[in-house]
Image: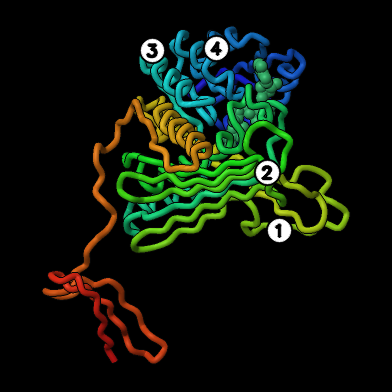
Amino acid sequence: MAKIAMLGAGFIGDFYTFSINGQRSRDKVCVIYSRDEARGRAFAEKHGIARWTTSMEEAVNDPEADVVIIGLPNSLHLKAVELAASAKKPVLCTKPLGCNADEAKKMLELVEKAGVPHGYLEDLVYTPKTLKALQSVRTGAIGKVIWTRSRETHPGPHSDWFWTKSVSGGGVLLDMGCHCIEIGRNYIGKDIKPVEVMCWADTLVKPIEAEDNALGWVKYDNGAIGQFEVSWSFRGGMDLRDEVMGTEGTIWVNNFLRTGFEIFTAGGKKGYVAEKSETEKGWVFPVGDEVVELGYTDMFTDMFDSLDNKREPSETFYDGYIVNEIMDACYRSAKSKKWEPVRLDIWRGQAKASKISELISYDENHFLVKEERMPDGSVKLILKDKKTGVISQIVKK
Ligand SMILES: NC(=O)c1ccc[n+]([C@@H]2O[C@H](COP(=O)([O-])OP(=O)(O)OC[C@H]3O[C@@H](n4cnc5c(N)ncnc54)[C@H](O)[C@@H]3O)[C@@H](O)[C@H]2O)c1
């Protein structure tokens, strides 16, 4: 049973608390930190939390709290981790871990030096569909993963600080690219080293300093590619989709928008529909249970189970650090317009991964390249001579 000090009474603090205090959960938020007294009190009353405070230090050192959760703007994550590490309390931090890899590395070093358990709150690798899809990948259902594609787009974030680069550390690439990159890593294999990236990022629509649109490719040591597509100027709600292509199969996941629950309302829904929904009238696309479908429930179950059982959760500060390093390389690439290496001062996965390509023997002298049934009913086989390398075809009637 975890007793939590929640830092941040904003959007994610609210979602996290709904998820943790929800249903008949054993785990409870026992103190909320908000820099604003009135917001803190209102948050505590809404969620039935015993104490609120305007001091981050007081919340972290609350005698009842045995876990610290960070749901503050990006530029405050490091400070909050410092406090939790010096209080020797387990700490779970929202995404992105740091504003950049230097910060993320400091956070990883702080918790490891203090010997406190840590978790990276990357909810989108815990959506029920993603968990099932990952299980299928790990049992070999789609063979070896060749490439992944992860898309997170919406009309832009809900608070001023996201749009202010000095506080957020970056634009949509940092804010949402972190989700897509970690989803790709999970499918490709977190022990396979990300080696280089190519990224395009630009400010196309919004009057801001940071990028509001970005696309990128993360190349892994085994040759696999993780593509990400992120936007703060997409219209029509929040689009969270992933595709995985393997040597033996394919997975398509739609996590949020238009997933089979549709309401038409001529008068208007009169209230919240779903995160980042743009309309309350006409056809609307609600989500059954957002905290479950966005992964928060399974994420906290993994986090608190790991604390109870003294094991690591699936996502740790180390993962957050790797993601920040990949994003730093993306920013370098967007500037240089070239493939940029991912600089990993800390790497704990495979030193060298074997390549994806596989040779299937057709007979003693040939490899099979491809087999296809043609419209006339025949079967065409494309073969490669093992000695000469010559490609040929045979047709079986
Ligand atoms: N899916 C996700 O995992 C997800 C979704 C949204 C946000 N987040 C992350 O959560 C963090 C917070 O984002 P949010 O959406 O809750 O933002 P928010 O603006 O809704 O809430 C942030 C909270 O921090 C407070 N705050 C702002 N500046 C502060 C300061 N200088 N000192 C102390 N408190 C301050 C605000 O008053 C508010 O209570 C960010 O790191 C963001 O990336 C994660």
How far apart are the two marked residues, 1 and 2, measured between alpha carbons?
Answer: 31 Å
Judging by the rendered image, the residue that carries numbered circle 3 is 114
Q: Amino acid at mark 4?
A: Val
Q: Callout 2: helix, strand or loop?
A: loop
Q: Which mark is residue 262?
A: 1
Are discs 3 and 2 less than 8 Å apart at CB? Answer: no
Q: Quadrant of the C terminus?
A: bottom left
Q: Residues within 10 Å of mark 1 (few under 14, many from 20)?
A: few
- Could one spot residue 200 in this view of the protein? yes
Are discs 1 and 2 less than 8 Å apart at CB? Answer: no
Are discs 4 and 2 less than 8 Å apart at CB? Answer: no
Residue 367 in the image: state x and y as whole percent.
20, 71
Residue 376 in the image: state x and y as whole percent.
39, 92
Q: Which mark is residue 60?
A: 4
Q: Callout 3: helix, strand or loop?
A: helix
The image quarter in which residue 347 lies: top left
Q: Earlier in the sequence, mark 4 or mark 3?
A: 4
The image quarter in which residue 48 lies: top right
Q: Callout 4: helix, strand or loop?
A: helix
